[in-house]
Amino acid sequence: MSKHSRVYVANYKRFITFLVVLIALSVLVVGLTLYTISRNSLEGDFTEAMIEDGMVYTLEKDFYLTLSGDILTRYYYNGEAEWSKQVYAEGLNLASSARLVAIHDNKSLQALTADGEYLYSTDVVGTINRVICGSNVIAVFSEIVEESGEKENMMYFYNTSGSLIDSINFNPQYILDFGFIGTDDSLWVLTTDPTNVVPVSRIITYKPGVSMTGLTSLYSELVESVFFSGDYMYVATTTHLFKYNLFGQQLSSIVIYDWQIKSQCPNASDVYFAAVPRAQNSDDFYSNARILTDTTSSKVNLPKNVEALLMHNDLLYLFGQDTIYIYSAEGEYQRQYKVNSPVSFITCASGDQVLVKRDDQYYFLLLP
């Protein structure tokens, strides 16, 4: 082959290589552009929820349950029904965990596994106010009214066989809230004691059937909410956000007077809270917020028409009718997404999905 021919072949190969690289880059740019355009619109991230107004439902990590009349149904989050069961009465309330389901009225309780297997039914002494499910225990908050008119707050604990394994009388304290901690069926109970001269709030932790495991008392403080994250307990009062270890030792506090926590996001490194001024609770929209940790506070001026806030994955999501705004945990604006019609945030669902409502329909929205 002549020298001229070899040069021609080499140039031809370089041209082909350049052309292939150019085509690959063009495809990549087009792909990124299309992806960006698709993420600027959230329309493909809405999945219809099998929920209607007035329907009782619970949301778990891998499924959700609905109770319509006397029909209990378990769904995947893609809308596919796993099973349906007919229960014994209408007008019931529903509670669930990853393993158990409880259906109740104000006197009786029915228990099933999360797979729909019937376990037992039982009558409860007093009037049932609320029921929650753990991994292997169902906790029932019941109120007993004595002949004198005095009310006693009781907690009953049932195992998966329907046996009453423990009961606790909280008189003269009133139960304000309670919940399970993690998956080992440890329970926390928030109470207030009306017999004291100054307000006293107590957070008591139990291992049902075993013993009380902790007691944290707050004097002259009105507790609004309790959060658990790892080995720590966070207590929000009307004036402070406290951080405790699980032995009840206070580790830190921050003043939040006139601010109310609306959302919290736990993670391995820090726990973030979103709070709004109490005075704005009566307004149609929020105009500013604070992102809190147990030691820091960052103020955020909100865009127009923000109806709800959510801390999730170290980000602050703002639901502003037809726009969803995203801020960093430090309060810095990141990006925003338009939706075709107003969206109302309801609650967190599974993973990065939240339950929302728009056009009178319920949907699960995958957060961007």
Image (cartoon, rainbow, N blue to C red):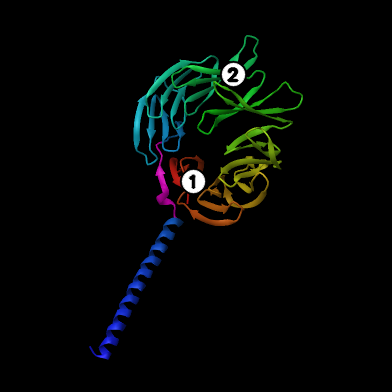
Is 186 left, or right, of 200 in this rendering?
left
The label number, if any, that marks residue 227 in the structure image: none
Q: Amino acid at mark 1?
A: Val
Residue at (49, 24) in percent of width and height: 137
Disc 1, SS: loop
Q: Which mark is residue 168?
A: 2
Give the mark toward the camera: 1 or 2: 2
Q: Would you say residue 107 is visible in this rendering?
A: no
On the question of residue 151 being in view, the answer is yes
Quadrant, the N terminus: bottom left
Which picture quadrant has residue 244? top right
Q: Is residue 147 left or right of residue 69?
A: right
Q: Are marks 1 and 2 in contact (CB under 8 Å)?
A: no
How packed mark 1 is, by other alpha carbons closer than 10 Å (few <14, some 14-19, many 20 or more), is many
Q: Indicate whether 88 appears above or below 310.
A: above
Q: Quadrant of residue 361?
A: top left
Identify the magenta region: 41-50
Q: Amino acid at mark 2?
A: Ile
Residue 129 picture location, percent across and down? 55, 22
Q: Residue at x 47, y 48 (%)?
A: 367
Say which of 142 and 113 sits in front: 113
Which residue reaches farthest left?
1
> What residue would you read off at disc 1?
343
Depth check: give the residue in front, 180 or 213. Answer: 213
**Would you say residue 290 sits in the magenta stretch?**
no
Q: Residue 110, percent across and down?
A: 44, 20
Q: Residue at x 58, y 42 (%)?
A: 264
